[in-house]
Image: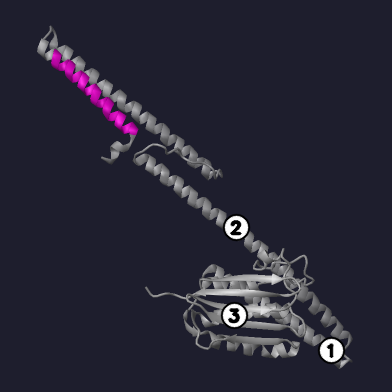
Amino acid sequence: MNVLTNRKIKWLFYRLLVVTIIFTVISAALARLKPPGVVFWVFLSSASMGVSVLLVIYLYFREQNKSMEEAIEQIRDYISGNRNVRIECDDEGELYRLFHEVNSLVSIINAHAENEGRSKKFMKDTLSDISHQLKTPLAALNVYNGLMQDETADISTLREFTELSEQELDRMETLVQNLLKIAKLDAGTILIDKAIENVSEIMGCIEQHFTYQAGQEEKKLIFSGKDTITLFCDRNWLTEAISNIVKNAFNHTKKGAAIRVEWRAFASVVQIIVQDNGSGIHPEDLPHIFKRFYRSRFSKDTQGIGLGLPLAKAIIEAHNGTIEVDSILGAGTTFTINFLIPTKL
């Protein structure tokens, strides 16, 4: 019986059994010996057995009540704010199983509270970062608008500041859009709709998107890979991820630089490599480049990395892929992305 797994209940039954046996033996002996007043002695023996049974049961329930009171006190302490309280449940039996489940529930509630605390801290830090990021383009726009008002007679100057204002507006739009995308990925509200896609076609769209920028900045954009390679992915999201990495390469290269994008397939992996010969990344910064709004103390760019690379990493990991970065300061950076090819068993 499960009820007998509790050591205290076992002892209760043992004591009741011992008391019953003792007084049964006494009553049987009295009945056999038939001393004077045997009826009185048998009655006295039965009454004593009843009192002994009640005493044993009382002591057992008093101890159980003590355990319950201690458990209630621990629960009250938890409600009062002490998150470290636990109910003693080292014994066996249904009551201690209940105590164990209460302790498990407390642990789950504490874990949820910690997660909520981390989420609030993340939201607070993110909002602070966004506020800081938006201050720069907003301040620039205010300056440009003031200068445009003072230079209304000079059309060339007006055109220059208009273009600069447009760049800052684009930067703000990109920041907000990336923030929305990465927030949706974090919340799990975006469905990654995977299908078999031709990698060459995806890369062709990315190349077409950046060709004009490469011409304007006088940079070489080189795409290479087999036309037959396919990947089980969400075409739109993968395009977003690779585009963010290519955009990062544009941001950290100078006139005349080369940006290479290569894709290839192995036995169980599809690999995409984005390589540039730009300024490179300081070794101290490498472990942090996928952190949101990370700013390097070695970089002259006060804008920080922003959300492009963190968003790319989130998308790649949503495809069960991995992304690694290697960089030599002053020589260039290489991003290597690996996607496992699903096998049919």
Q: Is residue 78 left or right of residue 282?
A: left
Q: Which residue is mark 1?
A: 158
Q: Which residue is mark 2?
A: 118
Q: Position of residue 312 (x, y in %)?
A: 60, 74
Which of pointers 3 and 2 indicates the residue nearer the eye? 3
Q: Earlier in the sequence, mark 3 or mark 2?
A: 2
Q: Amino acid at mark 3?
A: Glu
Q: CA distance from mark 2 to mark 1?
A: 47 Å
Instruction: Name the residue located 64 percent from the left edge and 70 percent from the top edge.
Output: 325
Label 1 packing within 10 angstroms: few (<14), some (14-19), many (20+): some
Which of pointers 3 and 1 indicates the residue nearer the eye? 3
Q: Amino acid at mark 1?
A: Leu
Residue 314 can be seen, yes or no = yes
Label ID, residue 240: 3
Above or below: residue 95 compared with residue 34: below
Circle 3/circle 1 CB separation < 8 Å = no
What secondary structure is found at the residue carrying circle 2?
A: helix
Work out which quarter of the rendered image holds the N terminus and state it. Answer: top left
